[in-house]
Amino acid sequence: MLEEKLPVRKSLVKSSLGPAVVAIVLLLGTGLGALVLAGGAGAPPRAGLAAQPPAGPARVAETATAVAPNIPFAPPVAPPAGSVTATATVTATTVATDPFALLNIFDFVPEDGALVSESILNVGGDATNEVLLTANVTRPQTTTLGTTITPTVGALAVLRYDATNSRWHVQWETGAASVPGAATELPDTFPGSSRRYQAGDLLRTGQPILLLRTVDPPAPPRLLPAVHLRLWAWTGDAAVPVQMAGPDGNPGPADFVGSSDVQLADLDDDGVMEVIVDSGAHTTVYRWDKDRFVVRP
């Protein structure tokens, strides 16, 4: 049995992460010397991911339609000419030996957003690691009935360092409007293991899988909360939604929803994760079948 799976009971899954939204508030100075991981025990900073060769399943198609961003993570404000700040372009007389010394993650969080977690990972395969941000955005919206609501939606963003211009930028992000509910923090690694959980090769396709778990509170006519788990496969410079078979058998972007919990576990001990959707009295298990998730008989 693999020791790296999340602790689950195969007959009934109980949440190990909890639905509480994690709010992180940090006071920063004018320069950020290092990025502190929010849950990266066992994952040393700036260390590249160990290569994990594919073990059979095909890569998630890079031609899949990516989600269009519509609540963008804020780009850093351009500094005055000739100045150097934590996110400014380095002048000819300044040598940047550590890209993370130039990074202030709160420059990228929307003004109406709150940071949930940040993780250092390597999805580009080069010497400089990327940063994955998870944030919640609360933005007033007007319904078709004319009333104003302020829903909270979760979002992901991958930050990448541009060595040519000595600046960090948003390489990819989710479309927040399609991810209802507040995001919850996910671990960087499986408990008691060095295997990656967030951005790990969870399907053994050789691709990092980015995860976003959100909790949408009860709202009429729905009497129970809705726990969503969405997955994206990294294709090199962007990510595309992982697919699942819908009720009609046709594939669509994976959105696993349960009223109690949704989590991953390697039930078959083959290194490929299954998705367990727990809705209290009913539990559904999805397995990876070549290029999509399907219900396991």
Image (cartoon, rainbow, N blue to C red):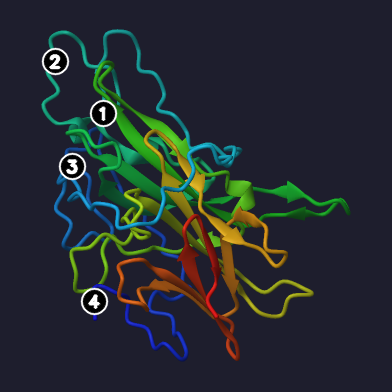
Q: Which residue is mark 3?
A: 34
Position of residue 220 relative to residue 43, above or below, is below
**Which SS class for mark 4?**
loop
Question: How far apart are the two marked residues, 4 and 2, measured between alpha carbons?
Answer: 48 Å
Apparent side of residue 155 relative to residue 105 in the rendered image (left or right): right
Apparent side of residue 258 relative to residue 54 in the rendered image (left or right): right
Q: Residue sitting at 41 percent across and 39 percent down?
A: 235
N-terminal-most mark, 2 or 3:
3
Foreground pick, 208 / 22: 208
Quadrant of the snapshot with the C terminus:
bottom right
Q: Position of residue 295 (x, y in %)?
A: 56, 73
Q: Which residue is mark 1?
A: 86
Q: Residues within 10 Å of mark 2 (few under 14, many from 20)?
A: few
Apparent side of residue 44 relative to residue 297 in the rendered image (left or right): left
Q: Which residue is mark 2?
A: 94
Q: Amino acid at mark 3?
A: Ala
Q: Residues within 10 Å of mark 1 (few under 14, many from 20)?
A: many
Question: How far apart are the two marked residues, 2 and 3, measured between alpha carbons?
Answer: 18 Å
Quadrant of the snapshot with the N terminus:
bottom left
Position of residue 116 relative to residue 123, above or below, is below
N-terminal-most mark, 1 or 4:
4
Callout in the foreground (4, 2):
4
For residue 95, which quarter of the picture?
top left
Q: Residue sitting at 58 percent across and 40 percent down?
A: 65
Foreground pick, 281 / 226: 281
Q: Which residue is mark 4?
A: 2
Question: How far apart are the two marked residues, 3 and 4, measured between alpha carbons?
Answer: 34 Å
Callout in the foreground (1, 4):
4
